[in-house]
Image (cartoon, rainbow, N blue to C red):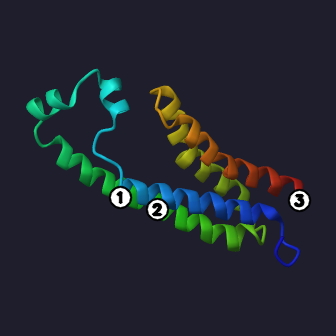
């Protein structure tokens, strides 16, 4: 705890840092198509290159945009954690809960739906968000 403040804000800040890291991965490291993407589509790299030649370059740009939004969500989460959430501002809990569900929560659910190789890692990454909300509720 920092100056008598609850751990929930620190854990939420960690969740924001994780999201920002995922965003940076999407911007700088994620390939246009992962092996699991091709498995899900029932296709091959050769088939995609032959039938949709511009897809790889287009997807790279899509992931730059998506990654930027994920990074921004992480930054805003860190900011909310050290301001509104830490100060227990009215509405902070519900906004943080909805933001978690609509960001890392939905990403995790979809990755389980498609059988992603990253589903368990994403579930682990979603846990600080859930833990922060639980800690927030227990600290009055």
The single residue placed furthest to the bottom in the displayed view is: 3
Q: Residue drawn at (33%, 32%), measured in percent from left and top? A: 35
Q: Position of residue 101 (x, y in %)?
A: 60, 45
Disc on the earlier residue, 1 or 3: 1
Q: Residue drawn at (84%, 53%), measured in percent from left and top? A: 137
Q: Position of residue 89 (x, y in %)?
A: 75, 68
* Relative height, residue 86 to residue 27 (above, below): below
Q: Which of the 4 image quarters holds residue 132?
A: bottom right
Q: Which mark is residue 93?
A: none
Is there a contact, CB below 8 Å, between mark 1 and mark 2? yes
Marks 2 and 3 sit apart, C-alpha to C-alpha, by 29 Å
* Relative height, residue 13 to residue 100 (above, below): below
Disc on the earlier residue, 1 or 2: 1
Q: Residue drawn at (61%, 67%), measured in percent from left and top? A: 78
Residue ID for mark 3 = 139
Marks 1 and 3 sit apart, C-alpha to C-alpha, by 37 Å
Q: Which of the 4 image quarters holds residue 18?
A: bottom right
Q: Nearer the viewer, mark 1 or mark 2?
A: 1
Disc on the earlier residue, 2 or 3: 2
SS for dot 1 = helix
Q: In the displayed structure, does residue 97 sit left or right of residue 7?
A: left
Circle 2 Cα neighbour tier, 10 Å, few/some/many (<14 / 14–19 / ≥20): many
Circle 3 Cα neighbour tier, 10 Å, few/some/many (<14 / 14–19 / ≥20): few
Residue ID for mark 2 = 71
Q: In the displayed structure, does residue 11 sit left or right of residue 2?
A: left
Q: Which mark is residue 27?
A: 1
Q: In the displayed structure, does residue 110 sit left or right of residue 99?
A: left
Which is nearer the eye, 12 or 22?
A: 22
Q: Which of the 4 image quarters holds residue 43?
A: top left
């Amino acid at each position: 705890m920092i100056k008598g403040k609850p751990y929930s804000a620190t854990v939420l800040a960690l969740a924001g840092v994780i999201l920002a890291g995922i965003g940076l991965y999407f911007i700088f490291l994620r390939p246009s198509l992962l092996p699991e993407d091709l498995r899900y589509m029932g296709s091959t790299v050769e088939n995609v290159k032959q039938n949709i030649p511009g897809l790889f370059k287009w997807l790279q740009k899509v992931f730059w945009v998506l990654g930027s939004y994920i990074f921004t969500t992480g930054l805003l989460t860190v900011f909310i954690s050290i301001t509104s959430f830490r100060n227990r501002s009215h509405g902070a809990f519900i906004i943080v809960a909805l933001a978690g569900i609509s960001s890392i929560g939905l990403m995790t659910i979809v990755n389980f739906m498609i059988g992603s190789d990253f589903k368990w890692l994403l579930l682990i990454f979603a846990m600080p968000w859930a833990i922060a909300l639980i800690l927030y509720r227990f600290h009055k």
